[in-house]
Image: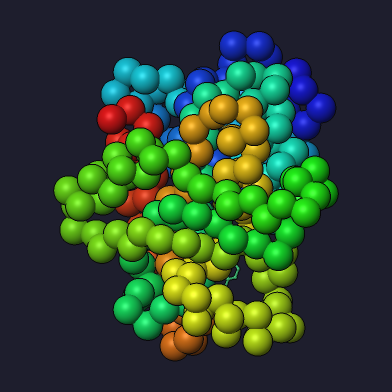
């Protein structure tokens, strides 16, 4: 057991998918894994371990925002020796050539700050995905009827951002989309020499104001899980 994860030693697979929402972890595990077993219920942040095409896989909720993800990713790495951590989640598109339902593969994740920021002091570290995972996810996305966008995203600390000028600057600098977790995941993975990637589905559009209905979110979420699994075991 770790502080926030109740799983026993050996209950967590070397490959972990991390949706923000614990109920999505449950849905994804029941939909895509064989013989899923619930390995964590602490604070309702559900985690499941099963197999995918014979490979052991854990799907563990991360919660929303970098401080929450940081707790789970730290414990998965330090206490359970997770090797590959893939965030699967939603994002808000920031470019007009990206549509809702599209898949975004985050090559880099910029942020104003993340829980690792203080440690890096004056260095503006560039959090980045594992190239092998990124390439494999891109290939997996191309194999299906999906438009994968690959590039930089922005990991925000605030969903209800009252600094529209900041978003403007992100758009201007070619940032594809905004979410709230990847920058910390990439920084932790780099520090501990693990592989990390964020596979995201566009749920809303900051420029057009479009929003994906809840029912469709689930459908496009499934595609993202498959891309993440194929990338992890490519
Ligand atoms: N995740 C999905 N949509 C988002 C948005 N608009 N801002 C931050 N995180 C998001």
In-image side of 158 versus 170 (left or right): right
Question: In the image, residue 230 lies at what x, y percent?
Answer: 30, 36
Q: Residue furthest front?
A: 122
In-image side of 22 versus 150 (left or right): right
In-image side of 71 versus 172 (left or right): right
Ligand 1: image quarter: bottom right
Up-down relation of residue 69 to residue 167 (above or below)? above
Residue at figure coordinates x 55%, y 57% from the top left: 109
Please say which color scheme the image uses.
rainbow
Which of 193/61 is in front? 193
Question: Residue 60: in sight, yes or no?
Answer: no
Image quadrant assignment for residue 78: top right
Residue at figure coordinates x 59%, y 35% from the top left: 189
Q: Quadrant of the C terminus?
A: top left
Which of 211/138 is in front? 138
Question: Residue 79: in sight, yes or no?
Answer: yes
Up-down relation of residue 217 to residue 121 (above or below)? below
Question: In the image, residue 21 lies at what x, y percent?
Answer: 60, 50
Which of 90/163 is in front? 163
Question: In the image, residue 22 lies at what x, y percent?
Answer: 61, 45
Query: Disc count in the image?
Result: 0
Which of 33/203 is in front? 203
Residue at figure coordinates x 41%, y 61% from the top left: 151
Q: In which quarter of the image is the N terminus?
A: top right
Residue at figure coordinates x 48%, y 70% from the top left: 175
Image quadrant assignment for residue 71: top right
Question: In the image, residue 231 lies at what x, y percent?
Answer: 33, 37
């Amino acid at each position: 057991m770790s502080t926030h994860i109740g799983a026993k030693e050996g209950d967590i697979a070397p490959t972990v998918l991390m949706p923000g929402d614990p109920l999505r972890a449950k849905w994804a595990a029941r939909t895509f894994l064989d013989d899923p077993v619930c390995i964590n219920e602490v604070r309702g942040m559900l985690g499941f371990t099963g197999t995918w095409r014979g490979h052991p896989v854990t799907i563990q909720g991360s919660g929303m925002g970098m401080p929450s993800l940081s707790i789970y990713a730290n414990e998965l790495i330090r206490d359970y020796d997770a090797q590959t951590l893939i965030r699967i989640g939603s994002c808000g598109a920031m470019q007009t050539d990206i549509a809702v339902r599209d898949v975004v593969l985050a090559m880099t994740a910029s942020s104003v700050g993340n829980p690792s920021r203080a440690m890096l002091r004056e260095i503006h570290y560039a959090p980045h995905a594992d190239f092998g995972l990124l390439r494999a996810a891109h290939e997996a996305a191309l194999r299906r009827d999906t438009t994968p966008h690959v590039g930089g995203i922005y990991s925000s600390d605030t969903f209800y951002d009252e600094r529209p000028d900041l978003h403007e600057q992100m758009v201007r600098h070619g940032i594809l989309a905004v979410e709230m977790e990847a920058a910390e995941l990439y920084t932790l993975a780099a520090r501990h020499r693990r592989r990390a990637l964020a596979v995201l589905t566009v749920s809303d559009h900051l420029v057009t104001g479009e929003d994906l209905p809840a029912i469709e979110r689930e459908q496009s979420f499934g595609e993202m899980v498959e891309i993440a699994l194929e990338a992890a075991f490519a």
